[in-house]
């Protein structure tokens, strides 16, 4: 979908989203707002496919993506209407009616996951600004981001197992990476709610601030992120994201390779490439 236009405001609104892209001297900032406040920003399959569309179509100038929620919560997770009997728009319901369509359901979920996976792309830094409830898919969306700033009223809950499901929107990997497998097991299998202070202790939040300071704290972070040169930031993010899967020797080699590329870029910029 590279090179395609961003979704229109009407398409975004139908998916429960708003998007604003601000261009600046140091790069662009995309602000994605979950915008169904009357439903605590419950998300549908349209939300996830629209998020994927945004990820594919964002201008190359964009370096930072901020995701926040309008109204009382970041997101109450999947719109429970997706399970409502008779909702034929829902791939989940179609599968329950015709369980032979496993491949169709797998493909549908893969499409939903696309809405989350792009947030880890090296060329952007994604920031979740979380207040109120972040439940199920909402918690997973926050986990899909590189950084999380929470307000002190934030409550995180991986609710899926309580509904007979597993978390399948790419949240299990970052959750385990951050809190470890044993704590992840405890959080997911009790489906208990983690408040902001505990989230900070578990490193699920980089920062916790009073509710009225959330927007300002996010702006400060965005300003600081934009001060780091773009290509160095992208190469460093790629290096860091790859570190858990490498041995020390492999990581050292990856550092060297990335640094050689940095110096080569400097040489090219000086006309010696
Ligand atoms: N899907 C659809 N509608 C929702 C959802 C949701 N996930 N969450 C809230 N709403 C609706 C409520 O039904 C209610 O609608 P109504 O005004 O027509 O009655 C409205 O939003 C306001 O919600 P309340 O429950 O009245 O608000 P309250 O502050 O008491 O509670 C809370 C908010 C905690 C978010 C509660 O609504 C809730 O638990 N929602 C369900 C959360 C859930 O189970 N999500 C699925 C997780 S699993 C996954 O995401 C894959």
Image (spheres, rainbow, N blue to C red):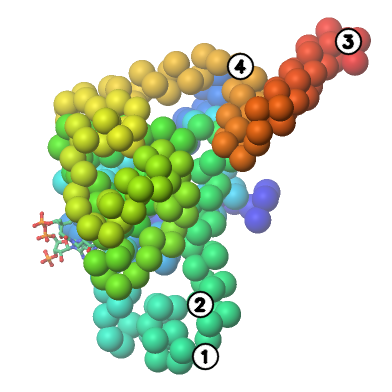
Locate the C terminus and report the quarter of the image it occupies: top right
Disc with the residue nearer the chain's start (1 vs 2)? 1
Q: Is residue 76 visible?
A: no
Residue ID for mark 1: 100
**Marks 3/2: CA distance?**
52 Å
**Marks 3/1: CA distance?**
61 Å
**Marks 2/4: CA distance?**
42 Å
Q: Residue at x 54, y 65 (%)?
A: 110
Q: Residue furthest top?
A: 270
Residue 240 point in image, percent of width and height: 58, 29
Q: Nearer the viewer, mark 2 or mark 4?
A: 2
Residue ID for mark 4: 229
> In terms of image quadrants, where is residue 66?
top left
Residue ID for mark 2: 105
Residue ID for mark 3: 271
Q: Residue at x 65, y 36 (%)?
A: 246
């Amino acid at each position: 979908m590279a090179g395609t236009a961003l979704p229109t405001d009407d398409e975004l609104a139908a998916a429960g989203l708003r998007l604003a892209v601000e261009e600046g001297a140091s790069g662009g900032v995309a602000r994605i707002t979950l915008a169904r406040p009357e439903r605590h920003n419950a998300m549908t399959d349209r939300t996830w496919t629209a998020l994927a569309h945004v990820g594919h179509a964002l201008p190359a100038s964009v370096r930072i993506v901020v995701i926040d929620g309008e109204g009382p919560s970041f997101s109450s997770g999947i719109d429970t209407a997706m399970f409502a009997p008779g909702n034929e728009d829902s791939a989940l319901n179609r599968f329950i009616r015709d369980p032979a369509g496993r491949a169709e359901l797998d493909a549908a979920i893969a499409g939903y996951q696309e809405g989350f996976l792009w947030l880890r792309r090296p060329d952007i830094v994604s920031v979740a600004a979380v207040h109120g409830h972040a439940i199920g898919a909402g918690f997973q969306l926050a986990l899909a981001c590189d950084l999380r700033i929470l307000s002190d009223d934030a409550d995180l809950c991986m609710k899926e197992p309580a509904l007979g499901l597993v978390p399948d929107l790419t949240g299990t990997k970052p959750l385990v990476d951050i809190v470890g497998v044993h704590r992840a097991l405890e959080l997911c299998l009790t489906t208990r709610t983690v408040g902001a202070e505990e989230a900070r202790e578990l490193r699920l939040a980089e920062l916790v601030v009073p509710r009225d300071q959330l927007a300002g704290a996010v702006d400060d972070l965005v300003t600081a992120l934009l001060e780091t040169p773009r290509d160095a930031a992208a190469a460093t993010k790629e290096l860091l994201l790859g570190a858990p899967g490498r041995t020390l020797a492999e990581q050292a080699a990856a550092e060297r390779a990335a640094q050689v590329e940095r110096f080569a870029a400097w040489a090219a910029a000086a006309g010696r490439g």
